[in-house]
C-alpha cells in the first residue's frame, strides 16, 4: 500500500483536509468532554455504587444526543441468572435508502481504581501530563466512546449528504465480564443490526503507529485438586514414606511447560504468523520481568503473545506461611488459566489439559479436574472490504501504514457479536498504546493518537458514505 497525500485525487471522494481540520478545531472541547466522563467512577462490580453507572450512562446518552443521533435510549437486560445488567446506551441514526449501517461499540464502565497511593494523579480526575491524559477510563474505554461521538459530529458537520446509518452501543459492564451481553444482543437485535461493527476497545501498535486488531486469544480455565491423604497428619510421624499434596501438585504444575518454557500440553494450537515483533528490551521493561529472568517460549515475542498458548496458575488453596504447622497437607486445589491461540476451541483445549493432567505420574494421588470457564479466540476476516477501508483511513490519519496485530488478551463478547450478527463485518480498533496501562494505576491516553483515532474513524465513515462498502 502506498501513502496518499491528503490532496491526492485517490481520496475516494473524501475531503480529508476538511475532516482533519474539523477535529482539530474541536479537539479541546473533545478533551473536556472526555475529562467529564473520567470524573464519573462507574464500576460495574458488585462492591461499587451502581448509581455511578447510571450517571455515567446519562452523561454518555447526553453526548450521543448532541452528536446528532435520532433516538437515544438507556437499556438494560437481565443475565441468565435473572440479575439485571448495567445500563447500556443505544443510539441510532437511520441510514438513507441504499446506504449501509455502522454500529460503533465502546464501554462506559471502568476497572476499579486500585490503591490510591499507586496513582501519581487522582484516579478519577483527568490530568494532562506532557502528551498524555491520565485517569481511570481515560483510555479504556471512555476515549473509545469519545472517538465514536466526535467522529460522527465531524462527518455530520463537514460531509454534505452524509447518509450512512450510524448506531451506538455503549455497554456498561464490560469490565465485569459482560454478564448480560448475549441476552442484550438477542433482545435488541433489530436496533443493533448493522453491516459493519466497529469495536473501539483495543490498542494500537505503538505511539505514532496505528493498528487493526486481527486476532484475539481465547481463554479457558480449570480447577485442579490433588489429594494424597485422607486427613492432615504429623509430618514427623508420617513424613518420608508419604508425600504431601502440595509436593505432588508441584510436580504436576512443573509438567505444564517444557525446558524452553513453552506450554507442554499436547493438542494445543500454536502458530508463527506475526508480521511484527516487540523489541525485547522494551517488552522486558513493560512487563517488569526481572533482568536475571529468561523469557519463556520460542519464536517472535508477538507470536508467543498472540498466536501461541499460555498457561498460568492463578490461585492456590493451602495454609498460609503464617498459619503453617508441621503437618502433611492432605489436599491442594489450584486454578489454571490458559490463553489460547486463534483456531483453538476452549473445549478442545480443556480436554487436552485434562488428558495431560491425567497422564502425569503422581504416585497414585487422586486428581480431580473441573473445567470452569472458556471464551473463544477470534480471527478477523482480512478479506473483508471494511478492513481495506479502515486501513486506508488509518493511513490517511497517521501518515503511517497500519499494523495488523494480534492481542494476547481475550474479548469474549466478540464471539457473541459474530454469532448474533453473522453477516456483519467486524473491525477491532482502539486508542490504547503499549504504555496506556489499562486496568492498572496511572492509566493514560496518548493525546495526539487520540486525535488521530477520531480523524481515522471520521474518514472511514465518510468514505463508506461516498463509495459504499
Ligand atoms: Zn475496555
Image (cartoon, rainbow, N blue to C red):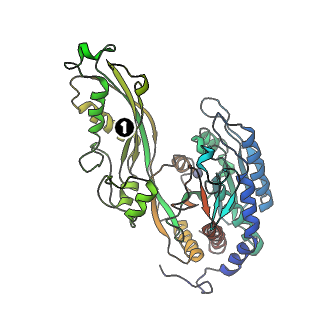
**Quarter of the image where the C terminus is located:** bottom right
Q: Where is residue 291? Give x, y as percent.
A: 36, 56
Residue displayed at 28% across by 38% down: 254
Badge 1 local density, few (<14 within 10 Å), some, or many (20+)? many
- Looking at the picture, does residue 163 appear above or below residue 416? below
Residue lying furthest bottom in this view? 8
Q: Where is residue 128? Give x, y as percent.
A: 67, 63
Q: Secondary structure at mark 1?
A: helix
Asked if ligand 1 lies within 8 A of label 1, the reply is: no
Q: Nearer the viewer, residue 149 or 282?
A: 282
Residue displayed at 33% across by 49% down: 269
Residue displayed at 74% across by 68% down: 28
* Quarter of image, res 349: top left
Left or right position of 26 against 329: right
> Is residue 219 something that shows in the picture?
yes
Q: Where is residue 5? Give x, y as percent.
A: 58, 85
Left or right position of 27 against 266: right
* Quarter of image, res 18: bottom right
Q: Nearer the viewer, residue 369 or 31?
A: 31
- Looking at the picture, does residue 99 appear above or below residue 7? above
* Quarter of image, res 425: bottom right
Residue ID for mark 1 = 350
Q: Nearer the viewer, residue 124 or 146?
A: 124
Amino acid at each position: 500500500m502506498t501513502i496518499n497525500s491528503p490532496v491526492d485525487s485517490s481520496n475516494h471522494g473524501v475531503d480529508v483536509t476538511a475532516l482533519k481540520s474539523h477535529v482539530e478545531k474541536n479537539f479541546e472541547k473533545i478533551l473536556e468532554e472526555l475529562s467529564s466522563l473520567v470524573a464519573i467512577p462507574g464500576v460495574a462490580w458488585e462492591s461499587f455504587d451502581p448509581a455511578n453507572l447510571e450517571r455515567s450512562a446519562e452523561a454518555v446518552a447526553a453526548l450521543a444526543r448532541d452528536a446528532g443521533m435520532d433516538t437515544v435510549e438507556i437499556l438494560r437486560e437481565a443475565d441468565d441468572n435473572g440479575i439485571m445488567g448495567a445500563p447500556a446506551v443505544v443510539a441510532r441514526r437511520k441510514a438513507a435508502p441504499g446506504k449501509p449501517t455502522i454500529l460503533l461499540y465502546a464501554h462506559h464502565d471502568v476497572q476499579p481504581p486500585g490503591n490510591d497511593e499507586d496513582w501519581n494523579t487522582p484516579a478519577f480526575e483527568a490530568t494532562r501530563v506532557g502528551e498524555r491524559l491520565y485517569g481511570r477510563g481515560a483510555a479504556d474505554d471512555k476515549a473509545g466512546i469519545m472517538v465514536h461521538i466526535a467522529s460522527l459530529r465531524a462527518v455530520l458537520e463537514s460531509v454534505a449528504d452524509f447518509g450512512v446509518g450510524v448506531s451506538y452501543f455503549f455497554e456498561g459492564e464490560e469490565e465485569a465480564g459482560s454478564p448480560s451481553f448475549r441476552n442484550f444482543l438477542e433482545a435488541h437485535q433489530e436496533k443493533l443490526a448493522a453491516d459493519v461493527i466497529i469495536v473501539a476497545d483495543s490498542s494500537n501498535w505503538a505511539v505514532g503507529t496505528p493498528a487493526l486488531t486481527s486476532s484475539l486469544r481465547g481463554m479457558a480455565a480449570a480447577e485442579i485438586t490433588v489429594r494424597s491423604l485422607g486427613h492432615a497428619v504429623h509430618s514427623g510421624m508420617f513424613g518420608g514414606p508419604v508425600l504431601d499434596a502440595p509436593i505432588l501438585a508441584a510436580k504436576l504444575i512443573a509438567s505444564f511447560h517444557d525446558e524452553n518454557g513453552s506450554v507442554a500440553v499436547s493438542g494445543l494450537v500454536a502458530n508463527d504468523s506475526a508480521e511484527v515483533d516487540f523489541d525485547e528490551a522494551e517488552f522486558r521493561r513493560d512487563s517488569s520481568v526481572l533482568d536475571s529472568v529468561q523469557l519463556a517460549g520460542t519464536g517472535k515475542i508477538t507470536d508467543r503473545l498472540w498466536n501461541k498458548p499460555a498457561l498460568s496458575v492463578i490461585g492456590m488453596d493451602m495454609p498460609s506461611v503464617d498459619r503453617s504447622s508441621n503437618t502433611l497437607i492432605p489436599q491442594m486445589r489450584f486454578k489454571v488459566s490458559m490463553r489460547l491461540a486463534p483456531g483453538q476451541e476452549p473445549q478442545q483445549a480443556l480436554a487436552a489439559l485434562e488428558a495431560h493432567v491425567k497422564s502425569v505420574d503422581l504416585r497414585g494421588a487422586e486428581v480431580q479436574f473441573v473445567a470452569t470457564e472458556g471464551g473463544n479466540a477470534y480471527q478477523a476476516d482480512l478479506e473483508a472490504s471494511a478492513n481495506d477501508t479502515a486501513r486506508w483511513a488509518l493511513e490517511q490519519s497517521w501518515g503511517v501504514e497500519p499494523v495488523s496485530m494480534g492481542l494476547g488478551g481475550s474479548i469474549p463478547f466478540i464471539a457473541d457479536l459474530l454469532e448474533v450478527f453473522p453477516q456483519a463485518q467486524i473491525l477491532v480498533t482502539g486508542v490504547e498504546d503499549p504504555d496506556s496501562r489499562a486496568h492498572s494505576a496511572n492509566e493514560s491516553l496518548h493525546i495526539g493518537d487520540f486525535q488521530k483515532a477520531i480523524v481515522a474513524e471520521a474518514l472511514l465513515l465518510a468514505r463508506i458514505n461516498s463509495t459504499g462498502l
